[in-house]
């Protein structure tokens, strides 16, 4: 998920489909935390933005069970290392969260004559 690679860089005005496409292509090695771009993005971008909003909960819906709710990166990393949190679960949660965060920006851009 390098910002120097346009096909991976997430822009503030990217459509939900573009965000999903870029994040689906990102590598997220099972049980590996170090050097994992998806985990780093959740840690350094998502948790920080959620904390600023006063809602530091990253929710990962599981296919066969209850949702996993993370309030900090430590537990998320532990679960990923122990294969409790698999890449196929974290990516949809990340896509949903990024799109939720970008939605107000997109809407403001679309309705603002000043931004056009």
Image: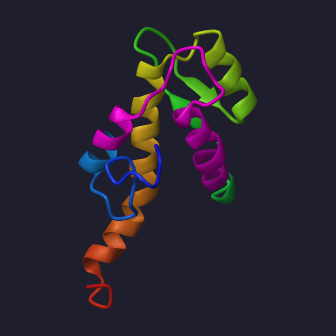
> Residue visible at 58% across and 47% down?
46
Instruction: Answer whether residue 43 is magenta in the image.
Output: yes
Q: Residue extending furthest right? A: 74
> Residue visible at 26% across and 74% down?
110
Which quadrant of the structure image shows residue 85? top right
Left or right of residue 27: residue 114 = left
In the figure, 34 relative to 12: above or below?
Answer: above
In the figure, 20 relative to 45: above or below?
Answer: above
In the figure, 20 relative to 63: above or below?
Answer: below
Q: Nearer the viewer, residue 101 or 83?
A: 83
Q: How is the image coloured?
A: rainbow
Give how far across and how far down residue 17 sits, in percent. 24, 46
Q: Residue extending furthest bottom? A: 114
Left or right of residue 62: residue 7 = left
Span highlighted in magenta in the image: 21-50
Q: Main secondary structure of the magenta part?
A: helix
Q: Nearer the viewer, residue 29 or 46?
A: 29
> Residue visible at 26% across and 89% down?
113
Location of the C terminus (image quadrant): bottom left
Instruction: Answer whether residue 81 is magenta in the image.
Output: no
Give how far across and how far down residue 36 sits, in percent. 57, 30
Q: Is residue 66 visible?
A: yes
Give how far across and how far down residue 64 sits, in percent. 43, 8
Q: Is residue 55 visible?
A: no
> Residue visible at 39% across and 31% down?
92
Give how far across and how far down residue 82 sits, in percent. 65, 9
Left or right of residue 84: residue 26 = left
């Amino acid at each position: 998920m390098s910002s120097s690679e346009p096909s991976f860089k997430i822009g503030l005005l990217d459509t939900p489909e573009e965000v999903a496409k870029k994040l689906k292509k990102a590598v997220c090695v099972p049980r590996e935390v170090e050097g994992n771009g998806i985990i780093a993005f959740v840690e350094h971008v998502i948790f920080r933005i959620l904390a600023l909003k006063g809602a530091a909960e990253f929710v990962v819906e599981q296919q066969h069970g209850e949702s996993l709710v993370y309030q900090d990166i430590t537990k998320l990393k532990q679960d990923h290392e122990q294969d409790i949190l698999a890449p196929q679960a974290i990516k949809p949660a990340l896509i949903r969260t990024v799109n939720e965060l970008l939605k107000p920006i997109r809407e403001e851009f679309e309705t603002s004559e000043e931004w056009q």
